[in-house]
Image (cartoon, helix red, strand yellow):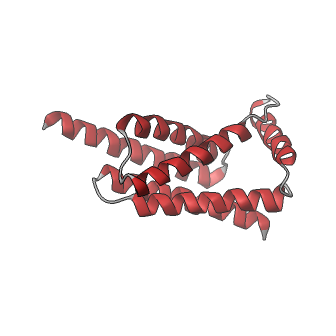
């Protein structure tokens, strides 16, 4: 049960995040979808720590290093710390949206760039098969919507 739960919680999180991004770029409410994406991400983290790492930071660190070594040749477990960072910052972002109703522009840009970096690594770089291509397609769609929004704004 562990592996499917780990995979599907993160996949559903990314689908919800994609939908939230589309809504946001179209100027529509996105806070609820973004919150669902975060909640599913937290379920993914909990499932991974429970089923794969037996709630051990050191086991997670070793597994992250192994995965990075298999993909890049570098024995680097620091990606786990990046994941901890995105978790804390995403929690802050969701809290901002619910308490302040919006994000400061600089915060939003910086956080979303970091979030996208992490999403590219998780959904494209470290993914395989059709999931890699779906992740890449989703990111290209978001990029196209963003560029279209910027172009429309500059023409107005």
Residue 75 drawn at (x, y percent): 82, 31
Residue 127 drawn at (x, y percent): 66, 48
Residue 35 drawn at (x, y percent): 49, 60
Q: Residue at x 75, y 57 (%)?
A: 48
Q: Residue lying farthest left? A: 156
Q: Residue lying farthest bottom? A: 1
Q: Residue at x 59, y 62 (%)?
A: 40
Q: 151 and 115: which one is in front?
A: 115
The image quarter containing residue 126 is: top right
Q: 156 and 49: which one is in front?
A: 49
Which part of the image, by quadrant, shows the C terminus? Answer: top left
The image quarter containing residue 83 is: top right
Q: Residue lying farthest front? A: 99
Q: 100 and 61: which one is in front?
A: 100
Which part of the image, by quadrant, shows the N terminus? Answer: bottom right
Q: Residue at x 26, y 37 (%)?
A: 150
Q: Is residue 79 above or below residue 141?
A: above
Q: Is residue 18 left or right of residue 66?
A: left
Residue 128 drawn at (x, y percent): 67, 49
């Amino acid at each position: 049960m562990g592996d499917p739960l780990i995979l599907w919680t993160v996949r559903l999180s990314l689908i919800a995040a994609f939908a939230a991004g589309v809504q946001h770029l179209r100027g529509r409410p996105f806070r609820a979808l973004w919150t669902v994406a975060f909640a599913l991400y937290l379920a993914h983290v909990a499932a991974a720590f429970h089923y794969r790492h037996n709630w051990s930071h050191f086991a997670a660190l070793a597994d992250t290093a192994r995965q990075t070594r298999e993909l890049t040749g570098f024995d680097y477990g620091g990606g786990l710390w990046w994941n901890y960072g995105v978790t804390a910052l995403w929690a802050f972002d969701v809290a901002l949206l619910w308490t302040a109703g919006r994000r400061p522009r600089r915060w939003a840009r910086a956080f979303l760039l970091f979030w996208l970096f992490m999403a590219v690594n998780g959904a494209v770089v470290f993914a395989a098969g059709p999931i890699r291509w779906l992740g890449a397609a989703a990111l290209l769609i978001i990029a196209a919507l963003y560029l279209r929004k910027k172009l429309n704004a500059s023409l107005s």
